[in-house]
Image: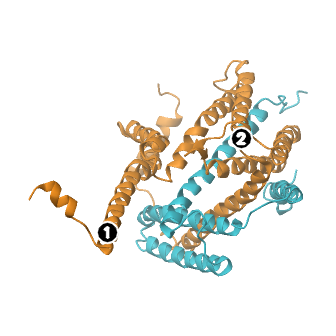
Chain colours: A cyan, B orange
Amino acid sequence: MTPLTSRRRWPLLVIPMISCLALLMLVVFLFGVGGVEESFKRFANALLTSFSVVSALLAIAMFSYADSRERPLAPVFTMLAISVVGALLSFGTLFVGGDLLLESNGSAMAQILYNVVQLLVVTSALFIAGGLVLGTAFAIITRSVERTIFEEE
Amino acid sequence: MPKTHYLKNATLRPDEWTIFFSLTNLKCTMEELFKAALLFWLPLMLVPTGAVFALSRKEGSRPMVGWAVALISSLMVMSSWLTVPESDSSAGGHLILAIIGPTILMAIGCLLAIFSGRIPVQRLPVYAGPVGFISVLLGLAWLLMMHLDNPPIWRHEINPYWLVWWPTFLLSVLLLSSFVIGAMLMVGDNRRNEAGVMAFFSLLFFVGLILLLKIDGDLTDAAQMRAQLWLATADAVGTILGILFAIVTVALVVAQYERRLPAPGLVSAMNEEEKEMVQDILNNNLGGDQE
């Protein structure tokens, strides 16, 4: 069997996923998508919110890294790097999409709060789906036919 | 002068009325914001904080306190649609409450199905397996019935976050099961049969999803479902990309630091005392004459 680290086998991980997504999107297009004018705004809001929240958590984690490695300035440089990337992402999305406020939210504050709850909802869906898929996969594996590891002579 | 007479004659100019109403509205808004912060946002932040607190160190009553904080905060988030109904964010708490039942059912089902299989320790009785699979199916059927017949209702209409959660969940199950099929083929040693069963599971979800995109529910029509699935894809892709950007940014900083760390200095040889200590530890652990 080709070893795990072989580059030839990596596409096996993503090809089924990308194929499924492409097929699903094709079906959606064939049936008719409908009103999805806000899709880029939703994408941009999700991108910026998840980036901000995860960056904040990782920046906090950098304080313990700074302690253990005796690099007191590590959190400062991390925050600097995060700010630069965040600014680039924000300018990029604003440049492409313009106003990022969704119709249902009248102000930036309302949009931010909406985005945080939306992130909670999306991540909960991802985690529950992940748990279900992993649980099913392990249930299938533990119930599969017992295989002999060594053949008796 | 009698008080009633004063009130009858008391009047404000139009601009004064405007200021009065603005101040009253501001006061109400501040009160509502404070209430929402106290009964929704603070508990929401305390859920992960309590869990991290409980998991970080297992000394004394720390785990119990941490889990208690996480549990009480979760209950407060889930009941926020009753405690702060005027806050739009409470729809999130309402959604979590709506999906907690099927989620628990599926989680218990998965555990029963896994631990009744061929595992070396703590194997459950044989009948736990079918019960587990039935439990998972019931959980999925519960969610399906919520889509077709009884979606979570918040402020007399479908909870807006349900329209985000349900398509994201379906899409995630489909994509993650495809990913797991790839992982079984790539990482597993001769796991083609298991990958085949997983492919069947994935196909079932795919067909189910296609049907949902074509069949109208009682309160959710197929066209709305298609639009929501498209938007959910945008949400999920945006969320995953945002997380990846954040991780890569921090990883780059850490990599730069690690690259510049000086090489560890040479350690002096052990003296006799240290050698004896090492010998003692080895004898205690490898000798076999201990209790």
A53 up-or-down from A82: above or below: above
Image x and y of residue B3, in percent = 13, 55
Residue type at tag 2: His
Q: Which residue is mark 1?
A: B17
Residue A52 or residue B145, whichever sits in front: B145
| Residue A17, label in figure | none
Which image quarter is the N terminus of chain B in? bottom left
Q: Residue at x 53, y 29 (%)?
A: B288
Bin the neighbour count of mark 2 within 10 Å (Cα to Cα): few under 14, some 14-19, many 20 and up. many
Q: Residues within 10 Å of mark 1 (few under 14, many from 20)?
A: few
Query: Which residue carries the number 2 mark?
Result: B147
Nearer to us in this view, A50 or B223:
B223
Disc 1 marks a residue whose amino acid type is Trp
Kindly indicate the quadrant of the structure image that contains residue B140: top right
Q: Tell me whether marks 1 and 2 sit on the same chain.
A: yes
Q: Nearer the viewer, residue A41 or A74?
A: A41
User: Residue A134 location, x and y as percent?
Assistant: 71, 42
Give left or right: position of A42 versus A7: left
Q: Relative to A81, is B6 above or below? A: above
